[in-house]
Each structure stands twice: as C-alpha cells, then as structure tokens.
Image: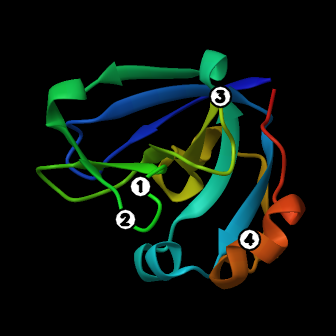
Amino acid sequence: MTTHKGGCHCGSVQIEIEAPAVIQASRCNCSICNMSGFLHLFVSNKNFRLLKGEEALTTYTFNTGVAQHRFCKHCGIKSYYVPRSHPGGLSINVNCLDPSTLESVEETPFDGRNWEQNISELSPISD
C-alpha cells in the first residue's frame, strides 16, 4: 500500500488515502462522471483521511439522493464523494491525486448510464 495525497484545485480541500501504487480505476459514462471527468478509485473509509477543508465542502445529490457528491465550494472540484455503489467506502477522483505516487493507472470502462444493470461490474473497494 502507498500513501497518496491529493485534493481540489485551489488547495482548500486536501485528502490522503492508502491504496496500491498501481491503480485499477473505473471510467464511468453516467451524466455526472462523464461531464466532470471523474476517474473512480474506490477505497474503504479506514483508508481515507480528510486532512483539510471540511468547511470548504458542499454537497450535491440527485436522482436517488444516496450518493453524496462533495465539491469544494471555492473551485468546484470534486476530489472524492460518497457513492451509492460502495457502502462503507468512498470514490476518489484519481485525477485529483498527486501523480508522483502513482506507478500506473489502468482504466476500465463502466456503463453508468445503465447503472442498475451493470453495478456488479464495478471494481471493489481497495483495501
């Protein structure tokens, strides 16, 4: 396991995760992921630390309201969120991690436009 740091564009939100150096990420084509360019790495809550910025975060929900999309209210970047797909975990935006600790990133496409039919294909939580 490697310690990866990252956060939002303006630096108001800073995170740290424990995950492999070789990342298995999911590229989702649902409306919000496609529009925002979010690249998913699912991690357990125990492997996530919000180092700075709780007060800078705002939450957006839609559709079922289960997923809690956490955005920096200053720069608008979503470095992580609480997904409905992985209870007990978080989805980290690989694009928001410092690339110096990433050995490689392998992207797997995920058909999030048809979420209910494909949810079993999502990668598991990195533990």
First reached walking from the N terminus: tag 3 or tag 2: 2
30 vs 43, left or right, is left
Residue at the spot of label 3: 88
**Element under disc 4:** helix
Residue at the spot of label 1: 65
First reached walking from the N terminus: tag 1 or tag 3: 1
Contact between labelled residues 2 and 3, with CB atoms less than 8 Å apart: no
Classify 88 as above or below 113: above
100 vs 24, left or right, is left
- The three-letter code of the residue at mark 2 reads Phe
Crowd band around label 1 with a 10 angstrom C-alpha radius: few (<14), some (14–19), many (20+): few
**Element under disc 3:** loop
Check residue 116 in the rendering and tell me which mark sits there, or answer none: 4
Crowd band around label 4 with a 10 angstrom C-alpha radius: few (<14), some (14–19), many (20+): few
* Quarter of the image where the C terminus is located: top right
User: Closer to the observer: label 3 or label 4?
Assistant: 4
Residue at the spot of label 2: 62
- The three-letter code of the residue at mark 3 reads Gly
Q: What's the CA distance linking mark 1 and mark 4?
A: 15 Å
First reached walking from the N terminus: tag 4 or tag 2: 2
- The three-letter code of the residue at mark 1 reads Gly
Which residue appears at 37% of the width and 65% of the height? 62
38 vs 19, left or right, is left
Contact between labelled residues 4 and 1, with CB atoms less than 8 Å apart: no
Q: What's the CA distance linking mark 1 and mark 3?
A: 16 Å
* Quarter of the image where the N terminus is located: top right
Q: What's the CA distance linking mark 3 and mark 4?
A: 19 Å
Crowd band around label 3 with a 10 angstrom C-alpha radius: few (<14), some (14–19), many (20+): few
- The three-letter code of the residue at mark 4 reads Glu
Contact between labelled residues 2 and 1, with CB atoms less than 8 Å apart: yes
